[in-house]
Amino acid sequence: MTDHNKDVPSLLARQTLLNRDLVRPVTARPVVRLLPWLDVVVIGGSVIDRGRDALLPLVDELRGALGDHRMLILTGAGVRARHVLGVGLDLGLPTGALSGLAATEAEQNGHLLAALLAADGVSYVPHGTVARQLAGHLAASPAVVSNGYPPYGTHEFPSPVGKIPVHRTDAGAVLLADAFGAQRLVFVKDADGPGGRVQASTPDLPVDALALDLLGTTKHVREFRIVNGLTVGSLTDALADKDTGTVVHA
């Protein structure tokens, strides 16, 4: 009777989610796409660092896509994050604290981009709102802006080399896009990729290595596109599934 009061009848009773034999029958089932119409667009911090000449044409392209797409626009950290990470490393801060510092810089870039799109009804929303209320916000507005850094905080995994967080904007974008079952994931960088259709193992791709590794385990996002945001029209073409940039697949 004592055990009955403590345990809920389940295959997981007194077990751990690390027991692969127990969770495998569940993980093999199809996963529901929560927002199958969602487009996730990632504006790299290095693009924003270039200032108005690089960013304002991108804002115009995003504005032009608002009528046809519902977007989660994610921003990355730029040069100021590199500075704050350098200071944090000098102070001996752990990986989790460094992650929070860099995420703050990505958030600042998000507020900047949202301000430029404010007249179109676009707002910045924090991680918690993206996780719980994204569908409601996108029912009222064609796009929202957030930052791409995953909110691991003090729970960030130790880096295999040094202390720099491994989960940065690119990895966070893949995780979010896959969690929502997005139909497209587009990375806007300030450089060209090799072009065409390539595998995630292709060297020298302008995205974080962990984002490429994640394609091996994702349920929905099995590919993403990288475009050069300094080439006017590349983002518009990517959202229209035209032959532009580099398509990276698992």
Image (cartoon, rainbow, N blue to C red):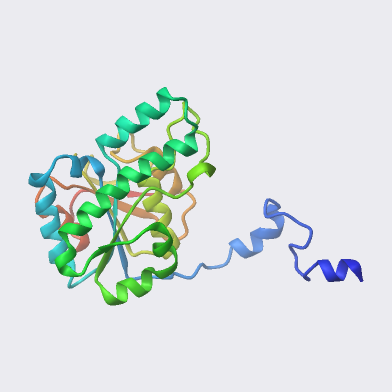
Report which quarter residue 213 is drawn in. top left
Give the residue at x 39% y 55%: 222
Above or below, 166 relative to 149 = above
Residue at image location 66% in from the left, 59% down from the top: 23
Residue 166: x and y in percent read 44, 38
**Residue at position x 45%, y 61% from top?**
179
Q: Position of residue 218 (x, y in %)?
A: 46, 55
Vertical relation: 157 (above or below) 122: above
Look at 45% across and 50% down and name the residue there: 151
State left or right for residue 202 relative to residue 189: right
| Res 232 seen here | yes
Q: Picture coordinates of residue 135 (x, y %)?
A: 37, 72
- Position above or below: 179 against 159: below
Tell me the quarter of the image containing the N terminus: bottom right
**Residue 120 left/right relative to 30:** left
Q: Nearer the viewer, residue 135 or 32?
A: 135
Percent of width and height locating residue 80: 27, 35
